Amino acid sequence: MNVFDKYAEEYDRWFDENPLIYNAEIECLKRHIPKGKGLEIGVGTGRFAKPFNIKIGVDISKEMAKIAEKRGIKVIISSGENLPFNDEEFDFVLINTVLEFVEDPKKALEEAKRVLKKGGKIVIGIIDKDSYLGKIYEEKKKKSKFYKDAKFLSAKEVIEFLKELKFKNIKATQTLFEDEYRKYEIKEGYGEGGFVAISAYK
């Protein structure tokens, strides 16, 4: 049993216990989410799919999928590297704090591109490895049941992947700053915030 199956309820409860962080991440991603038919890769318990009106997701965790389905999201048990969808099926694809867990992040991005319609949008959320928060996560990861196997990525690395895959018009937005007075601000770009949302068009 994988860790996300074993601790699905605990994982989901974290969002209720940390509403300021959760809402900042939602607001940061919201700047990038377009209208249309969306797919979330690594949908988890549906905490991000639901506010963005995403009706379908994939995940490898059956226990998390059960929680997402209670939120009205159809979940297919599958990995991000092998999506069970036709080419050009979605207007946008969300991949939020998931690339650090997939075996092959570039392959997952290739698959996302395949299922996107022409002109469709990819939206990615990460804990930026190069940020103060990324360094904290990296340090604590050995003791974390959820993050011990994570391979954190920097915003630069994700942007490089997108360029290699010929995505266009790459934009980034950041939040969760080290400065407590502006911790939950949303700001364009990356390099300061611990959480970064990155989007690009097919």
Image (cartoon, rainbow, N blue to C red):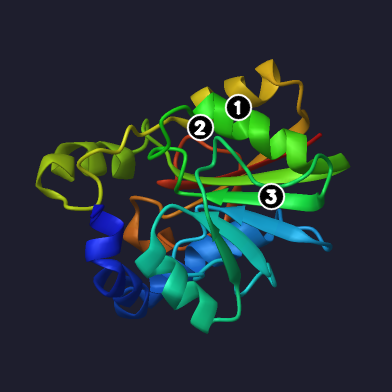
Residue 62 visible in the picture: yes
Name which residue type carries label 1.
Ile
Q: Where is residue 109 in the image (x, y as percent from the top left)?
A: 61, 33
Left or right of residue 27: residue 38 = right
User: Toward the viewer: 54 or 131?
Assistant: 54
- Within-10-Å neighbours for mark 2: few <14, some 14–19, many 20+: many
Check disc 2 and report the residue beneath it: 155
Kindly indicate whether the residue at mark 3 contacts the one at mark 1 (C-beta within 8 angstroms): no
The answer for how far apart the CA atoms under marks 2 and 3 are is: 18 Å
Q: Is mark 1 on a helix, strand or loop?
A: helix
| Mark 1 surroundings: few (<14), some (14-19) or many (≥20) residues within 10 A | some
Query: Are dots 1 and 2 in contact, CB under 8 Å?
Result: yes
Q: Which mark is residue 159?
A: 1
Which mark is drawn over residue 93? 3
Q: How many marks?
A: 3
Mark nearest the camera among 2 and 3 is 3
2 and 3 marks in contact (CB < 8 Å): no
In the rendered structure, the answer to whether residue 39 lies left or right of residue 201 reads left
Residue, x 50% and y 53% (percent of image)? Answer: 42
User: Mark 3, residues whose alpha carbon is within 10 Å: few (<14), some, or many (≥20)?
Assistant: many
Q: Which of 79 and 24 is in front in this view?
A: 79
Type of residue at label 2?
Ala
Q: Residue furthest left?
A: 143
x then y, percent, for residue 130:
37, 30
Residue sitting at 68 percent across and 70 percent down?
55
Q: Which of marks 1 and 3 is nearer the N terminus?
A: 3
> Is residue 49 something one can see in this rendering?
no
Q: Which amino acid does label 3 sit on?
A: Val
Query: Cα distance, mark 1 to mark 2?
Result: 6 Å
- Disc 2 is placed on an element classified as helix
Please say if 69 is above or below 29: below
